[in-house]
């Protein structure tokens, strides 16, 4: 029972919200939602601490090897639950201001977290599919939640239709893997590959379809077409949810599948990963430079950030570097997520009145509100990988992992793409610090609790950049 405590907690909260919605459909329980946020934060801290301390109560698998509960799963679930609680505090004021603070919004959000948790621990292909669909369908609803705006509906429909195609790819890939090995259980598929008792052609086609589906979920090139439009059309609270926590779940799924289940045939598809990663780095960064809408810019930024995660997994195909590569990839994903959360915590405060925000609307922000300007500077530095923020160390770990496996060309391309990306991140810094104040400059409006966690978030991005060993030590304990 204790092994499934994260799943039980999140399921209980989701069902409680649904029951609450049935009892009082027209009543918004603000206090209940806030209490839930703090419960999630405290629980997330507990689960993460339990995993990092290497608790003996955490086993490898349950339910006949169909569900994995190891330190990595427990730690990532803790981070997801912690992040979900913080996000609720960040989005509260924004949702109230835009008349979107409704119980069903949070029910969908918590259900998406449950789907992500299932993805992290799934050791059966169909269970993986169910987790992905629970996560995706909830997020489709969140994307369309501001149904009074046509652009929001259009973005959600585009996301849902393309997402359905990606789901079809995933199911087709899973069916091919089953046809090649006769099993859907991760451990049995791994054993079939190790014993060479599988149809190699069908297996490779299945793996390619699975890669395409997961690349869509991450928004990697060439499966990125939906991302900028969905980011721009959706309300900012939904964009914060979409652009952060699901990435941890999909990165964990990449680890389970491509650094374990299909690891012995990695030579057959590693070139696909390399092409996707390089394309994502340069297409996203070069396109982001031309963007005027800040949410579209952040959409392309997310694509390039996740390409770095893929680079880490590429370097894991040298067995001597496997642990370091996975460590650097998961570390980078979590650092990106909390950097993006910090960015959106500021943007949510600036868009409490007007949902649309361009880069030029931020002109002179640091002169009017020095603390918020400095906070945005820290966020941009972390995303760009500029010291002394933790984003620099995260990028350094990925590049070191590539160098360890003699992927020198990929390492050089990663550095070059980071220089390109620094242009549009530093452009934000230039606009908020050196341009004259514009009449469109919005007021920053957030709750006290959101401001407190935003301050902690920003301080951690800076403090951990100065002393990164504290955080990397936690990840080593979780993964080793």
Image (tube, rainbow, N blue to C red):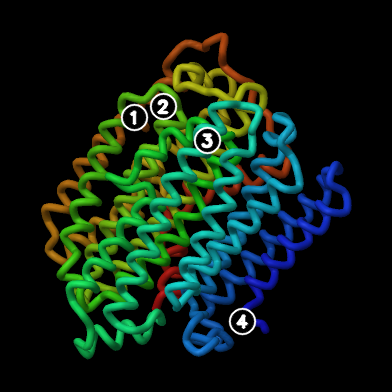
Name the N-terminal-most of marks 1 and 3: 3
Which dot marks residue 428? Answer: 2
- The CA distance from mark 4 to mark 3 is 38 Å
Residue that numbered label 4 is attached to:
3
Q: Residues within 10 Å of mark 4 (few under 14, many from 20)?
A: some
Nearer the camera: disc 4 or disc 1:
4
Q: Position of residue 363 (x, y in %)?
A: 48, 17
Whether residue 260 is visible to the viewer of this picture, yes or no, is: no
Contact? badges 2 and 4 (CB < 8 Å): no
Point out the frontmost of discs 2 and 4: 4
Q: Quadrant of the N terminus?
A: bottom right
Which residue bears the numbered disc 1? Answer: 424
Q: Residues within 10 Å of mark 1 (few under 14, many from 20)?
A: many
Give the labeled residue for mark 3: 375
Instruction: Estimate the x, y position of residue 140 in percent, counting from the top left.
Output: 55, 46
Q: Label 1 to label 2, Cα distance in Å? A: 7 Å
């Amino acid at each position: 029972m204790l092994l499934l405590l994260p799943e039980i907690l999140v399921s209980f909260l989701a069902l409680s919200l649904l029951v609450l919605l049935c009892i009082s459909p027209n009543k918004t329980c603000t206090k209940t939602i806030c209490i839930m946020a703090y419960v999630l934060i405290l629980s997330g801290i507990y689960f993460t601490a339990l995993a990092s301390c290497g608790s003996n109560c955490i086993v490898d698998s349950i339910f006949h090897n169909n569900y994995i509960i190891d330190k990595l799963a427990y730690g990532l679930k803790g981070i997801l639950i912690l992040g979900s609680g913080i996000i609720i505090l960040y989005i509260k004021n924004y949702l109230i201001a835009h008349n979107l603070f409704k119980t069903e919004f949070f029910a969908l959000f918590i259900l998406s977290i449950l789907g992500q948790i299932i993805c992290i621990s799934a050791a059966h292909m169909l269970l993986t599919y169910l987790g992905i669909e629970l996560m995706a369908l909830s997020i489709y609803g969140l994307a369309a939640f501001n149904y009074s705006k046509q652009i929001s509906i259009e973005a959600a429909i585009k996301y849902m239709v393309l997402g359905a195609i990606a789901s079809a790819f995933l199911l087709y890939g899973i069916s091919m893997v089953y046809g090649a090995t006769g099993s859907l259980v991760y451990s049995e598929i791994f054993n079939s590959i190790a014993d060479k008792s599988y149809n190699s052609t069908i297996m490779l086609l299945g793996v390619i379809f699975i890669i395409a589906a997961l690349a869509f979920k991450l928004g990697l090139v060439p499966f990125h077409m939906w991302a900028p439009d969905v980011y721009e059309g959706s309300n900012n609270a939904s964009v914060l949810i979409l652009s952060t926590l699901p990435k941890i779940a999909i990165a964990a799924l990449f680890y389970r599948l491509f650094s374990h289940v299909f690891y012995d045939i990695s030579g057959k598809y590693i070139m696909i990963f390399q092409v996707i990663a390089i394309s994502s780095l340069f297409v996203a960064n070069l396109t982001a430079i031309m963007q005027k809408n800040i949410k579209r810019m952040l959409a392309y930024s997310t694509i390039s950030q996740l390409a770095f995660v893929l680079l880490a997994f590429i370097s894991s195909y040298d067995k001597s570097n496997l642990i370091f590569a996975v460590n650097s990839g998961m570390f980078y994903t979590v650092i990106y997520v909390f950097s993006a959360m910090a960015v959106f915590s500021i943007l949510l405060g600036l868009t409490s009145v007007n949902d649309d925000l361009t880069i030029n609307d931020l002109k002179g922000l640091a002169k009017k509100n020095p603390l918020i300007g400095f906070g945005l500077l820290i966020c941009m530095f972390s995303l760009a990988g500029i010291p002394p923020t933790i984003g620099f160390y995260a990028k350094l770990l990925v590049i070191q992992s590539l160098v360890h496996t003699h992927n020198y060309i990929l390492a050089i391309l990663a550095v070059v793409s980071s220089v390109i990306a620094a242009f549009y991140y530093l452009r934000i810094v230039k606009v908020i610090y050196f341009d004259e104040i514009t009449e469109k400059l919005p007021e920053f409006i957030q709750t006290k609790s959101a401001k407190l966690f935003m301050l902690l978030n920003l301080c951690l991005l800076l403090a951990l950049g100065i002393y990164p060993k504290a955080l990397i030590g936690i990840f080593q304990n979780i993964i080793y």
